[in-house]
Image: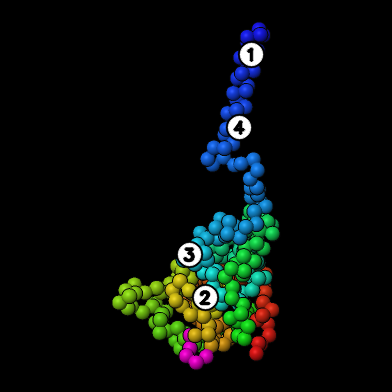
Amino acid sequence: MTRLSRTFAALALCAALVACSACNDAPGYPSPSAEIPRPDQQLDFHTLYKSNCSGCHGENGRGGAAIPLNNPAFLAIAGADNLRSTAAKGVSGTLMPAFAASSGGMLTDPQIDAIVQGMLREWAQPASFTSVTLPPYAVNTPGNAAVGQTDYIAACARCHGNDGTGIKTPTSPAPHSIIDVSYLSLVDDQSLRSIVLAGHLDFNAPDWRSYIAGRALTPQEITDIVAWLAQHRAPAAQQSIAAARTASPAVATPASAQKEKP
């Protein structure tokens, strides 16, 4: 290589190095000093929630197709253990997937915990439930659908109609049926129970304390109402939900709901 060729080669190398250095300052190019965690090391609640939960549960925990998570009553009754188990393992027979890597998902255990603790930190209101007797989040005994129909009429019919198909009003010309077989095929009994327990804030549905004037629903009434709703599933969906329930581990009862509070 001649001296002239070597000179041109050196100049070209310098130009390339300068260009690469300039790229580091270009818009959208990460700064060498920027601390960008690897995907499996991301522990920011808002980032994790937006990427994994908001599509179904809505931005900021409300407004999605699935039950609102930004609901203090739901968070108080479910508790951290149930929230963690559901996020990690999903719910068989429903659209709720497993997010933990140990269950086929893509999140680490610390990331699951970051989501759960973030919901409790930002959306729970524990002080509002210190003097409230919380009903159990889950039960292992089946309810009585016949009794549940009577309880349903007393507690829910004023909004949903005596038969569950809804009430047509000027503001709701197409009422939502809570016994629609398509809807019931997408949710399990625990999902129905969660809505009866905690209400549905997106639709101004109250929690278990306000269904009946002057008193809250009892745990048995809640169980029986869920049984009445569940019996409206199509037979195939009933079998699918029953099989998923048999295959799933028992749901934990939060310590806050295990004893009666003053």
Front residue of 107 and 147: 107
Q: Residue at x 51, y 80 (%)?
A: 207
* Quarter occupied by residue 99: bottom right
> Within the image, what quadrant is residue 21 found in?
top right
Please, what is the three-letter code of the amino acid marked with disc 1? Thr
Mark 2 in CB contact with mark 1 (< 8 angstroms): no
Q: Earlier in the sequence, mark 2 or mark 3?
A: 3
Label located before the other in sequence (3 or 1) = 1
Quadrant the C terminus occupies: bottom right
- Name the residue at 59% across, 76% down: 125
Q: Which numbered tag is attached to residue 64?
A: 3
Instruction: State the separation of the CA atoms marked 4 and 3.
Output: 45 Å
User: In front of the other: label 4 or label 3?
Assistant: 4
Badge 2 vs badge 4, beta-carbon distance below 8 Å = no
Residue labelled with disc 2: 195
Tell me how far mark 3 sits from mark 1, CA to CA. 64 Å
Horizontal and vertical percent position of residue 8: 61, 14
Q: Residue at x 62, y 86 (%)?
A: 131
Q: What residue range appears in magenta?
A: 211-215
Q: CA distance from mark 2 to mark 4?
A: 56 Å
Q: Look at mark 1 in the image and give the residue it sits on.
A: 7
Query: How many marks can you see?
Result: 4
Q: Residues within 10 Å of mark 3 (few under 14, many from 20)?
A: some
Taking the spot 53% from the left edge, 85% from the top edge, the residue there is 209
Amino acid identity at mark 3: Gly
Query: What is the secondary structure assignment of the residue under circle 2?
Result: helix
Residue 5: x and y in percent read: 63, 11
State which tag comes first along the sequence, 4 or 1.
Answer: 1
- Does residue 100 sit above or below 38 in this rendering? below
Q: Which residue is mark 4?
A: 21
